[in-house]
Image (cartoon, helix red, strand yellow):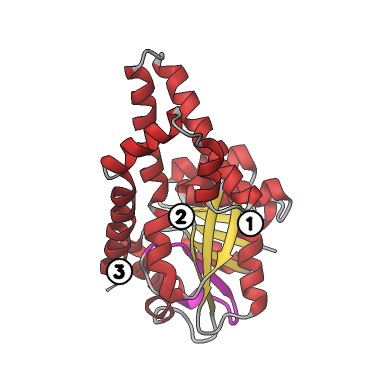
Amino acid sequence: MKIGVIGTGKIGEALIKGVLASGLCQSDQIFASDVDAERLGTLHSELGINTSVENAQTVTSAEVIILAVKPQIIHSVLKSIKPQIAEGCLVISVAAGVKTRAIEDDLPDSAHLVRVMPNIACTVGQAISAISAGTHATDVDLETARTIFGSVGRVVTVPESMMDAVTGLSGSGPAFVFQMIEAMADGGVHEGLPREIALKLAAQTVLGAAAMVLEIGEHPGALKDMVTSPAGTTIRGIRALEENGARAAMMAAVIAATRRSRELGE
């Protein structure tokens, strides 16, 4: 499979490294383009991939095109490469908030589109990516997208109508969790822990709790009860969370981010 990546920011670079590490592609089968020639030079020297400042060269060389560009410029990029997109080519977009119908308007009629919403954890191979099919995408196209994005984490398939909620929850979610980790560490520092140790304790605690949810399969409430003994330390902390509106605040954050995603797509 020859993969072309337009845009080599954090997401684009993570995908390139993921498919190489998984053995899905060899370095000579990956083509990348970006306006930042210096960044391209670094990727070429470190990974051995093909690079160019010309998007058209990436498109003509690839069987699968990944659009890892910002939503604000995706339409101008598409219009510039439309003549080079081969018939039946698979195009994958990770532009947040940009709906498939808007992208397909700038693609050849024969192009197959899959929309993907990954998150920043792809940079450490722990992403959760949601994929949805465009008008002409086949089951094979979806499986190809699952394979590519599976190289940097887990993948779920959703109808496009759910993509704004995905963006609000898992797309923006890492920032909410970073704030939570920082706040937990601050609490530890308040109680006498050194900052470095408090951060490590908080981050690993969140990582371990998340792993339990994913691997054990129990409802988070049931897992919470495993830790919460009568009149113990944990229930006292949970009471403080409830009194300070932590649950409502987290829900409000996801809802606000989802609404903003809808606004960007209008």
Instruction: Indicate the quadrant where residue 171 lies.
Output: bottom left
Residue named by callout 1:
150
Residue 107 location in percent, x, y? 45, 79
Outermost residue, front side: 230
SS category of the residue bearing label 1: helix
Q: Is residue 229 visible?
A: yes
Figure disc tally = 3
Residue named by callout 2:
7
Identify which amino acid the numbered label 1 is placed on: Gly
The C terminus lies in quadrant: bottom left
Q: CA distance from mark 3 to mark 2?
A: 23 Å
Residue 77 location in percent, x, y? 39, 66
Q: CA distance from mark 3 to mark 1?
A: 26 Å
Outermost residue, bottom side: 109
Identify which amino acid the numbered label 3 is placed on: Arg
Above or below 178: residue 130: below
Residue named by callout 3:
262
The N terminus lies in quadrant: bottom right
Question: Residues in magenta?
Answer: 82-96
Q: CA distance from mark 1 to mark 2?
A: 19 Å
Residue drawn at x 49%, y 25% is: 201
Q: Is residue 37 magenta?
A: no
Q: Is residue 249 left or right of residue 217?
A: left
Q: Is residue 57 visible?
A: no
Q: Is residue 126 left or right of residue 82?
A: right
Q: Nearer the viewer, mark 3 or mark 2?
A: 3
Q: Is residue 3 left or right of residue 258?
A: right
Identify which amino acid the numbered label 2 is placed on: Gly
Along the polypeptide, which appears first: circle 3 or circle 1?
1
